[in-house]
Image (cartoon, coloured by chain):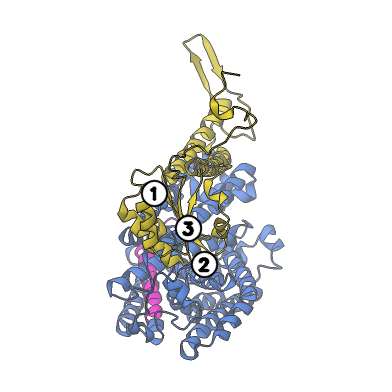
Chain colours: A yellow, B blue
Amino acid sequence: MSTLPDIIRPVTEGETVTEAPTVEDVGWGLMAEFETPAQIMEAAKLAKQQGFRWWDTHTPYPVHGLDKAMGIKPTILPLLVMGGGSTGFTVGFLLQWFTNATNFDFWALVPIRGYDFLISGKPLLSIPAWIPVMFELTILLSALGCVGGLLLLCGLPQLYHPTLRSTRFARATDDRFFLVIEAKDPKFHSEKTRSFLESLNPLSIEMLGD
Amino acid sequence: MGHGVKSITLGESHQAGYEVRRFGTLARWIGIACVLLAAVFSFGGFLGGSAHHFFRSWLFAFVYIMTICMGSLFFIMIQHATKAGWSTSIRRVAEHVAFNLQWLWILFLPLLALVLSGYGGLVWHWMDPAHVDPIIEGKSGYLNIPFWIFRAVVFLTAFYVASRFFVGTSIAQDASGDPSLTMKMQKWVPAFIAVFGLSLTFAAFDWVMSIEAHWFSTMFGVYMLAMSFCGFFSTFCVIFFLLRRQNKLLNEVTVEHWQDMGKLLFGLGIVFHAYIGFSQYMLIWYANIPEETTYYLARVAGPWAPWMWFLVFGHFFIPFLLLLTKHTKRCVPVMTGIALWMLFAHAIDAYVLVMPMVPAEALAQADDWKDFAALARSGSLNDKLGYHPQIADVLLLIGFIGFLVSGICHSMSRAPLVAHRDPRISEALVFENM
């Protein structure tokens, strides 16, 4: 019994239990609620000016220009898609070349031969017949690269997020716009950040628990 | 589209026609001069010109500008069918291009006259009784001159009516601002799309595919549609570039619209075109059936082969890689450069479509493909393969482009550059991709 820490010690009869002194709980972050896209746009611009790094906005639909106002860097997703596509193109060619038309000796000892089937009199290395496979693999790997890259870059799948605790936040998928500044941001200060958010005239400000 | 963040006003100056009538007249006279010069070269027999070749060249130039106009009509119809908002500010320029379908039939009259006077065989060999064989005989239920003429009249009328309806209704809306005109176009557009699809397909069969009447491809109409996309979206970009240079449509047509025109040129004019072209080639190449391969035999063995390779790289791979990223699509000068290049590639495409001939005798003599290829490569078949590029081809092409420019200028002088009272115009003004 003595090895257990104090806090989970069973309360003995007649003992007075006092609340433990708490350190100031800054929670996970502060969330401000706005009514219009124009307000969130303005708020995002000011938040960017303040130099916050760990913050985000949540809107019911894509607000054009918001990522620019937030100063989000261009995504590298197109490069991932390009990489996937060119891999598919090359692999599609190599696969067919290796299985059909290879004909060489490995270190002069091991003969490597493709399945040299003669199909309707076509040459073994016949690009036109291979293009459908190369095309499909290009599309497949581009698409997988796109979806996979998107999930990866967005940090999905994500089963829990602190904002989901807020009942107000349910309207982020309906008609309200939210700006969230996380407590781990180096510039975060529970009082100053709150007063900054207040200066933006939000409908409400809420502290989100972790 | 929820913003209300951005506000853009319509330029006042765009509510009247853009007075370019003089430029249009100049283009028309250049066109007439070029056509006359081509006729002199061809009928006079100068610089290797021949009367026989003249009408082929005529058909080539006709196909070139017809596909551009058909592409514009298709674009307009799709915008109405999908009730698109983003394109409202650029649709009128497409209508100025589609206007040309109202006079395009005039350029078909010489071909019609040729057929009526009994010399149709110069272009479409099945019309020449000397060339009739059992295969052509078997197709005579469809390929006979009276029915062919009847169909040509039907197609040209259909183009005329469609152009008149969409361009006319849209311009009428400038005066009345009546949203019911938009509803009217939306109501009728599905029927027009069906008529358009059938007309374009069968026009392609009649006017181009039947040049080699033994050959057939069910994809041919779709190929012509893909060509239309390429020709039109390139023309579209060039027109907007020129208007921009004249400080027109600076607010109405933004880089966002350019990106979307780039997407359409990329997706439909380059990728879809290559997809259809390659599919047609590969199916025929793979099946390797004598009556199907003739079309490509003439094109891949001899002097036409470099032209086909040009299409593979110049019409597909190079523009494909260039337009893959949004940065080129959003850069107006680069897009214009690519559009001009695609207009050139489109001309080569139309030329390779119309000009080559299948040398039946040479095929009969050759034992196999290698024999034929050797003959074709030696250059001795050039004439029989229809390979004699000459000055008349270029002159007629320039001339017809002159007529097209003249038609566009005429239409621009009559009506504003923007459908400024379209109910969806505000959507187009604040449109953003990202």
Residue B27: name its quadrant. bottom left
Closest to the camera, between mark 2 and mark 1, is 1
Q: What element carries label 2?
A: helix
Q: What element carries label 1?
A: helix
| B126 sits left or right of B402 in the view | right
Q: Position of residue A126 (x, y in %)?
A: 54, 35
Q: What stretch is highlighted in magenta?
A: B387-409
Specify the label residue A178 is tagged with. Answer: 3
**Magenta includes A195?**
no
Q: Say which residue label 1 marks.
A: A190
> The residue marked by circle 1 belongs to what chain?
A
> The residue marked by circle 2 belongs to what chain?
B
Of A73 and B236, nearer the camera is A73
Q: Residue at x 46, y 87 (%)?
A: B174
Of B297 and B255, nearer the camera is B255
Establish if A122 lies above or below B418: above
| C-alpha span from label 2 to label 1 | 87 Å
| C-alpha span from label 3 to label 2 | 73 Å
Q: Where is residue B113 in the image (x, y as percent from the top left)?
A: 52, 78
Q: Which amino acid does label 3 sit on?
A: Phe
* Residue furthest to the bottom: B176
Q: Position of residue B260 (x, y in %)?
A: 44, 62
